[in-house]
Image (tube, rainbow, N blue to C red):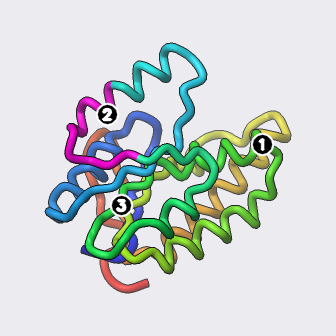
Amino acid sequence: MPKLSLVIGGARSGKSRLAESLVTMSARPRVYIATAQAWDDEMRSKITTHQQDRGADWRTVEAPLDVATELAKVPAGQVVLLDCATLWLSNHLLAGHDLVAQSALLRQALAVCASPVVVVSNEVGWSIVPENKLARLFQKAQGRLNQDLAQEADLVLAVIAGLPIVLKSGQP
């Protein structure tokens, strides 16, 4: 299994499902690092559905902000699914954190994690340029993070309408 894989796509494209199948195929103990926060009933329902779909053989860690610490705790011999970098970055944006510094911490934690990691992220580059400053700041930071993750990853898959497209396979 590659040390770092990136599964990227639009909202509701099937990227999480594909990432889960990649992790499951590894036959290693699975760790799911969840970055979503349940702010309303709809999101609570979505999180519950995801948990039920995965099944009980995943260890789930809730880490809306401190993914780096959780990655450092994963022992060798396991496999991690980080779902997703987009919500993680949004959480930091809304908390007023330095997105460049946080992104650097995440990338460093991914580089030194003892186990392979599959990261899910949304592609924001195909959307329009947002009309407000906060949304443009997020789009810029997410685009930069995705580019950095793709550069460092051994495997990059794009998902469109549930179909995977290999963008990169091999060493960074």
Residue 151's place in the image compared with 34, above or below, is below
Give the x, y percent position of residue 15.
Answer: 35, 46
How far apart marks 2 and 3 lie (CA) works out to 15 Å
Residue at 57 percent of width and 63 percent of height: 69
Residue type, numbered disc 3: Val
> Mark 3 or mark 2, which is nearer the start of the sequence?
2
Q: Is residue 171 toward the left or the right of residue 144 in the image?
A: left
Marks 2/1 in contact by CB < 8 Å: the verdict is: no
Magenta segment range? Answer: 49-60
Residue 6's place in the image compared with 162, above or below, is below
Q: Is residue 9 toward the left or the right of residue 94 in the image?
A: left
Which mark, by number, is residue 95? Answer: 1
Of 37 and 18, the residue lying toward us: 37
Residue placed under numbered mark 2 in the picture? 51
Give the x, y percent position of residue 74.
Answer: 40, 66
Residue 75's place in the image compared with 162, above or below, is below
Mark 2 crowd level (few <14, some 14–19, many ≥20, 10 Å Cα) = some
> Mark 3 or mark 1, which is nearer the start of the sequence?
3
User: Which secondary structure, mark 2?
Assistant: helix
User: Which secondary structure, mark 3?
Assistant: strand
Which image quadrant: the N terminus? Answer: bottom left
User: Which secondary structure, mark 1?
Assistant: loop
Give the x, y percent position of residue 145.
Answer: 61, 62
